[in-house]
Amino acid sequence: VYDLSHPMHDAMPVYPGKGQPGFSQATFLESDGYREMRMVFDGHTGTHIDAPAHMLKEGKTLAQYPVSRFSGKGVVISVPPGTVHIGLSFLKAREREIAGAGYLLLRSGWSRFWEEERYMEGFPVLTEEAAQWLTTMRLKGIGLDAISVDPVESDTWPVHHLIFGADMVIVENLVFPPELREEQVFFCGLPLPVRGADGSPVRALALITG
């Protein structure tokens, strides 16, 4: 079992313009007899999942999906270093593996910049053509080790809209440990069961079942 999730803490990176999460002690063992932490964060904090309701007026919320939607056979595809745009020809070369998966997991290595300023810019993103093709592959979702499937400077988010329009979810800010060598995994990224949520932090896992 491999953990694909970034740790959450007060100073963790957040999408530009978003507020920092807060983690504080609500009760203390010495005075209250038990410990309890208070957690305050946006739904799209850290390693998280996006539902179509995030951007589509009639899009589904996370709670409208069965829990089985958030797990399934995953194919981990490594994006070559220096890639800026993940194009159609690159994905079509792996069409057989993608077609047999529930989740396409794109490993670019960008998570190595997680707590650096450069994490927020220059990361690889899908082209609109590639995203459109992926909507025909009957995937449950797409995951990647970057802050977004669209550039941070975008204000129209075309790749998000294409993926959401196909009733797929997106998992962002994954981290692939170097010891994970396998390309075929069982992926699991369960959101919190919050009614009406358009996104939620997840504990994302890759399980090797062979």
Image (spheres, helix red, strand yellow):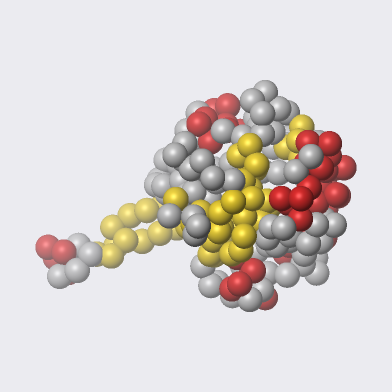
Does residue 78 show up?
yes
Q: Is residue 57 left or right of 173 when viewed as pictured?
A: right
At x 62%, y 60%, the residue is 73
At x 69%, y 57%, the residue is 101
Q: Is residue 195 above or below residue 201?
A: below
- Residue placed furthest toward the top: 82
At x 80%, y 51%, the residue is 134
Q: Quadrant of the N terminus?
A: bottom left
Who is closer to the viewer here, 170 or 139? 139
- Residue placed furthest toward the left: 30
At x 87%, y 42%, the residue is 129
Q: Quadrant of residue 36?
A: bottom left
Q: Is residue 3 above or below residue 87?
A: below
Q: Position of residue 25 (x, y in %)?
A: 28, 58
Who is closer to the viewer here, 168 or 184? 184
Who is closer to the viewer here, 89 or 86? 89
Q: Position of residue 111 (x, y in %)?
A: 53, 36
Q: Is residue 198 above or below residue 94?
A: below
Does residue 202 show up?
no
Q: Is residue 175 left or right of 135 when viewed as pictured?
A: left
Number of disc labels = 0
Q: Quadrant of residue 137?
A: bottom right
Q: Position of residue 96 (x, y in %)?
A: 76, 50
Q: Position of residue 177 (x, y in %)?
A: 46, 40
